[in-house]
Amino acid sequence: MKVYAYDSYGGPDRLFADTRPDPDVGDTDVLISVEAVGLNGSDLETLRGSPAYARLNGLRRPRRQVLGTDIAGVVLKTGPGVTRFAEGDRVFGDILDIKGGLAERVAAPERKLARCGTLTATEAAALPQNGAIALQGIGDASLQGKRVLINGAGGAAGTLAVQRARALGAEVITAVDRGSKLARLSEIGATEGIDFERKDFTAQGDRWDLILDLFGTRGAGRVVRALKPDGRYRIVGGPVGALLSCGLIGSLHRSGGRSIGIMALKQSTDVLERLAGGVLDPIIDSIWPFEETPAAFAHMASGNSVGKVVITL
């Protein structure tokens, strides 16, 4: 089967077309003919081998050489222990721990998949990881009268988080990203925008009830100043130093009203089924053919995309 692989850490130029044997199908695995792959920031981190936690895929060289975690496609074969799917079912899911989606076929555990429902393959591939981040990071409680800030709002997870905050009734949704993205973010629900290249949201004197930080561009000590006394701050990704400082600051504030911490993503079949049911609308920046996989990664790496970059096979 055709794949896009890499055998050393670096940028999109390290990706190359290759052929590999079809994957083995375990007892509770499903073999999928991949139709679409949604690119995540975690794919780019794993390709670069940076931040340091991305080297869990191999200290010097990647062990798993085929990236791709958000997938959608058609079931070709099921293992003997599979009970939820049959040949011909349209499925999608997040296979972060095994990867391998940038291929014509991939084998994935059935517990990591759900049926696409009415979603197209492109729409389904745009949702798994980033939709889960938006649902978990923003939550389910009413945000009526609340002020929400999303740092990195223009990315795939950020656009869905803006949408989720709007659906829950947030009074103010502050989108922090490049100035070129702010008009689009206003269209999908942001009530105000901050160009991070011009202003530091932690130094403005404003305060928010909820801050979802997708990139960790400000130290937790500075972010706390922008949080209301009973506010919640969650960091999703970023440099190791930012994550460590968040853990330290969070431990110092446990006795107060603020809640500060690292958001450990909890993916599940229930979450995927919610996404298939239409709780969030996928925001797709661009769609690329499989043959242009390196260019798709380069586009995402440029930081100019708004929403999800999707590759189709």
Image: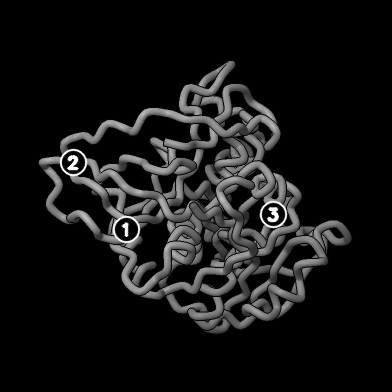
Q: Which residue is denoted by mark 2 in the rendering?
A: 28
Where is residue 134 shown, x and y percent of the image? Answer: 50, 63
> Along the line of sight, which residue is nearer the eye, 287 or 162?
287
| Residue at the image position 28 percent from the left and 44 percent from the top | 31
Instruction: Give the camera-side residue of 162 and 105.
Output: 105
The secondary structure type at the circle numbered 3 is helix
Q: Residues within 10 Å of mark 3 (few under 14, many from 20)?
A: many
Quarter location, residue 145 = bottom right
Upstream in sequence: badge 2 or badge 3: 2
- Residue that badge 1 annotates: 91
Q: Nearer the viewer, mark 3 or mark 1?
A: 1
Mark found first going from the N terminus, 3 or 1:
1
Height in image: 253 above or below 123? above
User: Which quadrant does the N terminus fall into?
Assistant: top left
Mark found first going from the N terminus, 2 or 1: 2
**Who's the residue at 61% across and 71% down the image?**
148
Residue tagged 3: 223
Relative side of 134 to 212, left or right: left
Q: Residues within 10 Å of mark 2 (few under 14, many from 20)?
A: some
Residue 260 visible somewhere in the drawing: no
Q: Is residue 214 above or below residue 59?
A: below
Q: Position of residue 127 (x, y in %)?
A: 46, 61
Number of labels in the image equals 3
